[in-house]
Structure formats: structure tokens, C-alpha cells
């Protein structure tokens, strides 16, 4: 468009202007919505680096801060915001409090000596220094046995992810590439297991695991994932169906067997979806609370982070800063992984429910 | 565009009895080898336990007294009929569903509509940010909201105070705990939001252009084009949400413990089931409660699936 040199028609300009305004107005509105929606993160972040005083103090600001102190002649004095006769505020330390008149020291130029100020010092505002208490995280890390919980969670989720990937890839390959009598019935059974409430299966499954002596071990949390699940099979099948069959046929003519075709044709074409499935399982396992609650409630040393944080927080329920620090530590890895694999992940979510 | 459930049609079932050639047999055999993990898994973790559960429900099986397991006939079902806590559980779950279900259905649609609005700048960035809370593990989310809605330092009541409103003690009130739980749930709609958004983006632009020519405003376009086109996703969400809500109990469990506090307000049906089966090891009665839940879910699903033809529009549906 090369109309920069021509004078723009004023109504076109007006239209452009109107469009710009409506866009900025709407975006601003969405930013406000987003801020409300994400506000709890703000609460968590600020609270997790406070100490008890910063939380309970009635005049304490939202950010973790301490009242400023100033050392003068070997003594600590609180710093207040004091207005002078021109209405400018100064950070002065109060060294002698009086009802109608107090003595201050200018923290910027202490050499000028004590200053007399007339007025009620109680009406003055304190000066606050931003002072996050990072040690909360170290405390939670130690006390809640984070390294051990992280190790447990990683083992459970990574082995489970491997199992999910292996089994779901195989099953999706079977559903997408082979003519099997009754395949449509099998596929419908697979899909219908989405609506099967887990409560129906959990009671006998628990009894079986108990008989096998698996309660109090990681096995009930890992082994079932080696048998595929509906969502991921559906996702992978949908994707495999988009890979041109000509590639398979060419490989078949070259004498490649079914397994060979899966490994050298299908899998290399599907890396992003496979990553998505792996990440889904990792997130799911990280989040899983019910499984560990049932199978690991007696084995403290084997518990993953979901249970660990709940136990820790139940103990520290009167220390909000510790509770929030633990909540933060519990979500940092999944959130980091999400931002790394964000594109693949979000596309995968759409694929699990909606087919194009 | 359609959803998983559009596969759910008996028309698609093809059962042909033909003699298979040797080559076809080989192919079918290989296919079954690849399907084997799921077929075995289906028998082991889905079909087997579902039937075993049904069998359990006619026994007095208790893990603590397993030697004396006995056929109990319909005793468990009679017990259910006279169990005040089961009734309480149903009442609490329905009460919760009455707010949670509408929110769970409409919130993703509204969010997707906002993210699909062409007036919005940096739509991808906003989509990611609105999705982000869904990644937060449930346990962390519960504690974040617990602090957020605290009466002392929580931001929520502080914000209400700015408008001169004294906020309630959310999680200790038998009334206010339900909206508070729904608010925690509002962080988990990201998946549905993304699916709805993707479906909205897939609506052919010609439809909107045609409506424009007919003089339709933005609201009319949404009502008569967008909404019908996303009904498959709404339906998918409705089915999954209903199933999820009847089983709901983990969030209040983490929040308030297993005793239904405050004052039975969180005695969800799932909580009752969990306690009967796993706290008291009453596997027989637990299985009964589970099967009653399953029957309820089945009825709901069947009802939803039969109403589907009146309001769900599958673009490629009529083959």
C-alpha cells in the first residue's frame, strides 16, 4: 500500500482512529480481567517471602517490607515521612517523640543535627523498606524434605510417562494403520472408557494391589500406565491418521515390517505430539493426589510432592508464608515445563478433545 | 470440526463377516499385537474392576475382616436407602453442581469469545496467560486460594473492603464455601477454553460475511453462528463436567480434611465413598456406593446423548 504520500481521506483516518481506540479499549479491559484472574499468584508470590510480622501487621504494605530504621549515635530509630512547610516529604528518623513536637534527624544529611518539628508524629507515615524473606524457601525445602519428594515425584512421573508413550503409541498405531475385524467396536469401547468414573474401578483395583502386596510402593502409580489410556490414544491416533499412507506403502514395498514402519516412518513424523503426550503424563502424575493418598499414605519416604505439600501445610496452617512458599515450590517445575513446551502442549490439548 | 464423542455413533460400527485372506489375517494379527496393551489394560483396569465392583456390592467384604466375607444379597442397597450420610452426600454434591456446572459451561465460552475477539491485541500471549492457572497443581492451587480468601490478610476480602463490603469467612461458612470452591474451579477450565477457542477459530469466515451482508450485529453473529458451531465442544464439556462433578471431593478434602467441615458442608458423595471404602475398609458398601454413582452417571450420559440431536450441530455429521 503506497498511499502514504497521498493525503488520507479524513473519514478513513477517523475510522482508523476509531478502530485503534476500540482495540486499545478492549485490550485494556482484558488486561484488567487478566489481573483479577491471576491476582492469587500475586498473593502467593508476595506472601511466600514475608515473615509473620509482615503478614499480621495492620499497617503492613502488600509487598514484603519492614519499617525502616536509622542508626544514630549507636541507637536505632524508626524512619518516618515528614512534611516540611513547603509540603515536601523527607525521610527523617525520629529520635525523640513528643506529643506536640518531636525531634528528628535527616537521614540524608545527619550532620545538620537534630531538627525540631511541630506536629503529631503519630499521624506520620512510616518509611518501609522492601525486604523479601528468601529464607522461607530454604526452610520449606529442608523441613518438608523437598529433595526426597522431588526425587519420588520425578521417578513416578518419568517412568509413567515412558509407559504411557510406549503403550499409547503402539495402540494408536494399531487403530490407525491396521484392518482388524471389530476395530470400530474396540475403538468405541476405548472412547467410552472416558466416561467410566474412577470410583467404580478403584475399589477392586485397590483390593488386587493389596493382594499383590503393592500398597506402600510406587507400583500402583506406575504399572497401569503401561496399558494405554483413552485420551492419549485418541490424540495419537488422530495425528497418525494425518500422516500420508503412501509413506508406509513405500516402506512396505522396501520390505519393512509393521514394527519397522512404526519406528522409522510414524514416530519420526510425530515427535511434537509424542512430546505433548509425555508432558501431559508428567503434569498429570505431578498433580495426582488421589493415587498417592490411597497407596502411599503409610510410606512417608516414598510420597510424592502433592501429598508431601499437603502434609507440610496441614502442620504449618498458622504460618501463611510457609504455606505459600510450599505451594510455590510445588508448582514451579510444571509451570516451567509448560512455558518451555507451551506451543506443543496447548496444541495437544485441543487435539485430545476436538478433531479437525 | 467435532469432538471425541462424535465417534460415539452406532452408525459408525461396521461389522462385516467376510472371510479373511491370509494376508488380511496377518495384518489383523499384527494390529491386535499393537492393540494388546490396551485390550489387556481394558480388561485389567476397566472391565474387570467394574464387574468385580458389582460383585463386591452384594457382599459384606471388609478388608479388615477378609476371612469372613459373606454374600449379603441386597443388604448394601438397603443400607444405602437408610444411610443419612449418603443422602447428605447426594444433597451436598447436587448443591455444589447447581453452581459449578453453569460456571463450568459458560466460563470457557466467555473466555474463548474474548480471546477470539479481533479487537484484542496479542491474542496468543493472552491465551497463554489465561491458560496458565490450569497448569498449577491442584494442591498448590488450593493453598493459594485458601490464602487469597483468608479473612485477615487475604486479598479477596481486602478488595471487597475497598468497596465497603465485609467479606465472609469463605472456607468456614456453610454457605459461602460453595462459591469459594467454584472459584478455585475457575482456574481449571483452561483445557476447555482452548478447545472452544480452536473451534471458534475454525468457523468458516464466509458465514460471518454472509451474516454481515444480512445486517447482523456482533451479538446476533455470536448467537446464530458461533454458538451453534461450538455446540459439539459444549456438549463434550457438559458430559465431562457432569461426570467430574458427581465424583468431586479432592479439593474440599485438601482444604478442609475428610470430615465434611464446616458443619457437613463438604460432605460430598465422593467424600462419603472414600471414607466408607478406604478409611473404614468397607469394600462391599464402598463398591455399592460406587455402582450407584456409576448408574447415575450412565443415566445422565444417556440422557445427554439422546438430547444431542436437538441441539448439537456436527458439521460433518450427516454422512
Image (cartoon, coloured by chain):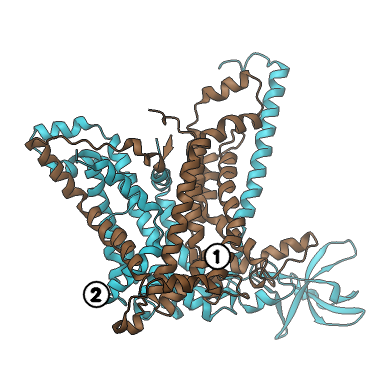
Letter of the cyan chain: A
Give A96 or A145, whichever is nearer the viewer: A145
Return the x and y of residue B281 as percentages of the image width and height.
39, 79
Return the x and y of residue A88 as percentages of the image width and height.
84, 62
Give me the residue at 60% from left, 37% from top.
B120
Q: Is B104 placed left or right of B39 in the picture?
A: right
Give me the residue at 41% from left, 28% from top.
B318
Kindly indicate the quadrant of the structure image that contains residue A217.
bottom left
Q: Is residue A148 above or below residue A156?
A: below
Q: Is residue B308 above or below residue B61?
A: above
Q: Is residue A190 above or below residue B80?
A: above
**Residue at the extreme front:** B73
Say if residue B229 shows up in the picture. Answer: yes
Give me the residue at 22% from left, 32% from top.
A245
Q: Chain of mark 2?
A: A
Do the residues under discs 2 and 1 have CB atoms within 8 angstroms? Answer: no
Q: Chain of mark 1?
A: B
- Point out which mark residue B90 bears: 1
Give me the residue at 35% from left, 65% from top.
B54
- Quadrant in which the C terminus of chain A appears: top left
Letter of the brown chain: B
Residue count near mark 2 (Cα–Cα under 10 Å), binned few <14, some 14–19, many ≥20: few
Q: Which residue is mark 2?
A: A212
Amino acid at each position: 500500500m503506497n498511499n502514504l504520500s497521498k493525503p488520507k481521506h479524513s473519514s478513513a483516518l477517523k475510522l482508523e482512529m476509531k478502530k485503534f481506540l476500540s482495540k486499545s479499549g478492549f485490550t485494556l479491559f482484558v488486561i484488567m480481567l487478566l489481573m483479577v484472574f491471576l491476582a492469587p499468584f500475586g498473593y502467593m508470590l508476595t506472601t511466600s517471602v514475608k515473615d509473620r510480622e509482615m503478614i499480621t501487621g495492620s499497617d503492613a504494605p502488600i509487598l514484603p517490607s519492614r519499617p525502616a530504621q536509622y542508626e544514630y549515635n549507636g541507637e536505632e530509630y524508626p524512619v518516618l515521612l515528614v512534611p516540611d512547610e513547603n509540603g515536601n516529604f523527607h525521610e527523617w528518623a525520629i529520635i525523640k517523640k513528643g506529643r506536640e513536637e518531636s525531634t528528628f534527624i535527616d537521614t540524608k544529611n545527619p550532620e545538620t543535627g537534630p531538627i525540631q518539628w511541630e506536629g503529631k508524629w503519630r499521624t506520620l507515615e512510616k518509611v518501609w523498606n522492601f525486604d523479601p524473606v528468601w529464607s522461607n524457601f530454604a526452610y520449606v525445602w529442608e523441613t518438608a524434605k523437598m529433595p526426597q519428594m522431588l526425587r519420588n515425584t520425578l521417578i513416578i512421573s518419568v517412568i509413567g510417562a515412558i509407559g504411557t508413550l510406549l503403550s499409547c503409541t503402539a495402540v494408536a498405531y494399531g487403530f490407525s494403520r491396521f484392518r482388524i475385524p471389530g476395530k470400530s467396536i474396540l475403538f468405541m469401547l476405548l472412547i467410552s472408557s472416558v466416561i467410566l468414573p474412577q470410583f467404580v474401578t478403584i475399589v477392586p483395583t485397590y483390593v488386587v494391589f493389596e493382594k499383590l502386596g503393592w500398597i506402600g510402593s510406587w507400583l500402583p502409580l506406575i504399572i497401569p500406565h503401561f496399558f494405554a489410556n483413552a485420551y492419549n490414544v485418541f490424540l495419537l491416533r488422530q495425528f497418525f491418521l494425518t500422516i500420508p499412507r503412501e509413506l508406509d506403502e513405500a516402506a512396505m514395498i522396501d520390505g519393512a515390517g509393521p514394527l519397522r514402519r512404526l519406528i522409522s516412518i510414524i514416530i519420526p513424523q510425530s515427535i511434537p505430539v509424542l512430546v505433548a503426550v509425555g508432558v501431559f503424563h508428567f503434569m498429570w502424575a505431578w498433580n495426582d493426589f488421589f493415587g498417592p493418598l490411597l497407596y502411599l499414605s503409610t510410606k512417608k519416604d516414598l510420597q510424592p510432592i502433592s501429598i508431601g505439600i499437603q502434609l507440610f501445610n496441614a502442620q504449618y496452617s498458622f504460618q501463611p508464608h510457609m504455606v505459600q512458599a510450599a505451594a510455590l515450590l510445588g508448582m514451579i517445575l510444571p509451570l516451567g515445563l509448560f512455558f518451555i513446551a507451551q506451543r506443543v502442549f496447548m496444541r495437544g490439548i485441543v487435539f485430545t478433545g476436538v478433531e479437525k | 470440526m467435532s469432538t471425541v464423542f462424535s465417534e460415539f455413533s452406532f452408525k459408525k460400527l461396521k461389522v462385516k463377516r467376510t472371510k479373511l485372506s491370509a494376508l488380511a489375517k496377518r495384518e489383523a494379527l499384527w494390529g491386535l499385537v499393537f492393540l494388546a496393551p490396551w485390550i489387556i489394560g481394558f480388561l485389567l483396569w476397566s472391565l474387570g474392576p467394574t464387574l468385580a465392583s458389582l460383585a463386591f456390592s452384594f457382599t459384606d467384604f471388609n478388608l479388615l475382616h477378609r476371612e469372613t466375607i459373606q454374600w449379603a444379597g441386597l443388604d448394601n442397597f438397603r443400607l444405602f436407602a437408610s444411610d443419612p450420610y449418603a443422602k447428605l452426600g447426594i444433597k451436598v454434591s447436587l448443591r455444589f453442581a447447581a453452581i459449578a456446572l453453569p460456571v463450568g459451561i459458560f466460563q470457557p465460552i466467555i473466555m474463548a469469545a474474548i480471546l477470539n475477539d479481533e479487537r484484542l491485541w496479542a491474542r496468543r500471549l493472552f491465551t497463554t496467560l489465561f491458560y496458565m492457572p490450569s497448569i498449577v497443581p491442584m494442591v498448590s492451587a488450593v493453598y493459594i486460594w485458601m490464602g487469597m480468601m483468608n479473612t485477615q490478610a487475604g486479598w479477596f476480602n481486602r478488595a471487597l473492603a475497598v468497596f465497603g463490603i465485609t467479606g465472609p469467612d469463605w472456607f468456614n461458612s456453610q454457605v459461602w464455601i460453595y462459591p469459594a470452591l467454584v472459584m478455585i474451579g475457575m482456574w481449571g477450565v483452561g483445557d476447555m477454553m482452548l478447545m472452544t477457542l480452536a473451534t471458534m477459530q475454525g468457523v468458516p469466515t464466509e458465514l460471518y460475511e454472509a451474516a454481515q451482508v444480512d445486517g447482523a450485529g456482533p451479538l446476533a453473529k455470536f448467537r446464530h453462528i458461533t454458538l451453534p458451531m461450538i455446540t459439539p465442544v459444549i456438549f463434550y464439556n457438559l458430559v465431562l463436567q457432569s461426570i467430574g462433578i458427581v465424583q468431586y471431593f479432592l479439593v474440599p478434602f485438601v482444604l478442609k480434611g475428610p470430615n465434611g467441615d464446616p458443619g457437613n458442608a463438604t460432605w460430598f458423595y465422593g467424600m462419603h465413598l472414600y471414607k466408607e471404602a478406604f478409611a473404614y475398609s468397607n469394600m462391599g458398601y464402598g463398591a455399592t456406593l460406587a455402582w450407584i454413582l456409576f448408574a447415575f452417571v450412565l443415566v445422565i450420559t444417556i440422557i445427554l446423548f439422546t438430547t444431542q440431536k436437538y441441539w448439537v450441530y456436527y458439521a460433518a455429521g450427516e454422512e
